[in-house]
Image (spheres, rainbow, N blue to C red):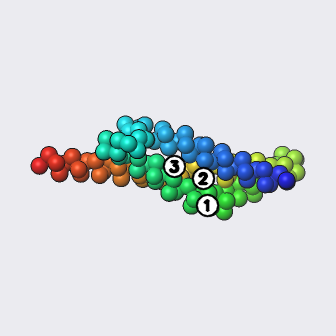
Amino acid sequence: MNAVTIAMGLGYVGGVALTYLCGTWIISKFGARIRFMEVKRNLPGVLGAIGGIAALLPALFLGTVVGGLGGAYGEVISQTVGLGMAGVPVGLALGIALVTTVVASAGVLLGAVLGKVVNALASRTSAT
């Protein structure tokens, strides 16, 4: 295996791990939990988790395409410092991880907001 393949693998794993951490933080800020057995009380958490899972495949694809620019930036920086091409794998891994995390966390955020809106509308309807 070459360094680029290892860097891509680390970028994917790092992106998914950071998405989990960011998604958990986003859902906790909405005051919800991810409990599939108690959907009515935890709708923002459940829809946030579903949104994150649904956004994961496009996030990985976009991370591969756009995150590759991190390799180009890594090359420019390492050439400037005088390290040759050593920065390409590092920039590639960071770019893939960052783009994957941002896109999938946006899916978690959209799902949690949708769950909060549905809860608000349901409580408003039942109150009248």
Tell me if I can see residue 82 in this picture: yes
Mark seen at residue 11? none
Distance, label 2 to label 1, CA atoms, is 7 Å
Disc 2 or 1, which lies upstream in sequence?
A: 1
Residue holding disc 1: 62
Q: Is residue 20 left or right of residue 1?
A: left
Q: Give the residue type at disc 2.
A: Thr
- Identified at 17% across, 51% down, the residue is 125
Distance, label 2 to label 3, CA atoms, is 8 Å
Which type of secondary structure does the marked residue at label 2 adopt?
helix
Which type of secondary structure does the marked residue at label 1 adopt?
helix
Residue 115 location (% of width, % of height):
35, 49
For the view shown, which residue lies furthest in the left direction?
A: 128
Tell me if I can see residue 80 in this picture: no
- Name the one closer to the observer, 29 or 72: 29
Q: Give the residue type at disc 3.
A: Ser
Mark seen at residue 100? 2
The quadrant holding residue 71 is: bottom right
Mark seen at residue 105? 3
Disc 2 or 3, which lies upstream in sequence?
A: 2
Q: Is residue 121 left or right of residue 94?
A: left
Mark 2 and mark 1 in contact? Answer it, CB < 8 Å. yes
- Name the one closer to the observer, 123 or 103: 123
Which type of secondary structure does the marked residue at label 3 adopt?
helix
Q: Give the residue type at disc 1.
A: Leu
